[in-house]
Image (cartoon, rainbow, N blue to C red):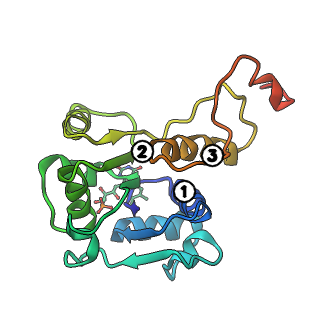
Amino acid sequence: MAITGASGAVYARRLAQCLLGSDVCVHLVVSPHGARILADELGVTNLSPEALVGGPAPQAVLHQHRDVGALLASGSFLTDGMVICPCSSNTLAAIAAGTADNLITRAALVTLKEARRLVLVPREMPLGQIELANMLRVSQAGGIICPACPGFYLRPQTVAELVDFVVGRVLDLLRVPHVLRTRWSPGAADSSGSGPE
Ligand SMILES: Cc1cc2nc3c(=O)[nH]c(=O)nc-3n(C[C@H](O)[C@H](O)[C@H](O)COP(=O)(O)O)c2cc1C
């Protein structure tokens, strides 16, 4: 799991909490701009897996952003996949261009070349032709573009519900079971007990 310098640190925290709560070993890489936004948006200053999730994180390993000699930099290190959440347009562009000068982009490109699951969660608006073209290129290479774009059909009442909607969809794409409320069915909105008013 990588965290880059797009707004939406709250998505990263919730995703890390859910992954670690699902018995998944998480190798974490945070870009310098990602760290800045974790500090700005969540008040996480002394970065560690524990500080990110706000509790114990025994199954998490934090790697240095510039360490392209870390385990994740090699296709011989077996992973189930990789998620970048949130994913900046900068990191998206680097992956689309095949540039691997830090551990996040190197690991992402390794994930693609090894035909493993790569999920990018961009948060940018509006999207210009360059971002759209980069998304298309990564998608054509096998990556999955999953924008931080919550649905409203379950009538969310809180920000936490909006965050869970996005995180739940990411977990689905990573094939990690969860119980977050994301699934549409006829009458699902009514079962929330309150309307959108
Ligand atoms: C406060 C702040 C918020 C930002 N939000 C976004 C954003 O939502 N999406 C985005 O693509 N870039 C955003 N940026 C710009 C990126 O942080 C910048 O392009 C940076 O180079 C990304 O580096 P990284 O990909 O190594 O993390 C933001 C920058 C700052 C300082």
Q: Quadrant of the N terminus?
A: bottom left
Identified by mark 1, the residue type is Leu
The picture quadrant where one finds residue 69 is: bottom left
Secondary structure under tag 2 reads: loop
Name the spot of residue 195 as percent of width and height, x first: 82, 25
User: For ligand 1, which image quadrant applies?
Assistant: bottom left
Residue hosting label 1: 15
Q: From the viewer's perspective, is the residue at label 1 or at label 2 nearer?
A: 1
The picture quadrant where one finds residue 168 is: top right
Residue hosting label 2: 123
As drawn, 43 above or below 172: below
Tell whether 105 sits left or right of 123.
Answer: left
Identified by mark 2, the residue type is Arg
Going by the picture, which residue comes out furthest to the right? 193
Mark 3 or 1, nearer chain start: 1
As drawn, 182 above or below 36: above
Going by the picture, which residue comes out furthest to the left? 98
x 40%, y 37%: residue = 125
Measured in 3D between alpha carbons, the distance from the residue under mark 2 to the one under mark 3, in whole angstroms, is 15 Å
Number of labels in the image equals 3
x 63%, y 41%: residue = 162
As drawn, 112 above or below 144: below
Q: From the viewer's perspective, is the residue at label 2 or at label 3 nearer?
A: 3
Q: Determine whether label 1 and label 2 are within 8 Å by CB.
A: no
Secondary structure under tag 3 reads: helix
Residue hosting label 3: 164
Tell whether 119 sits left or right of 151.
Answer: left
Task: Name the one closer to the observer, 130 or 25.
Answer: 25
Name the spot of residue 18 as percent of width and height, x first: 59, 58
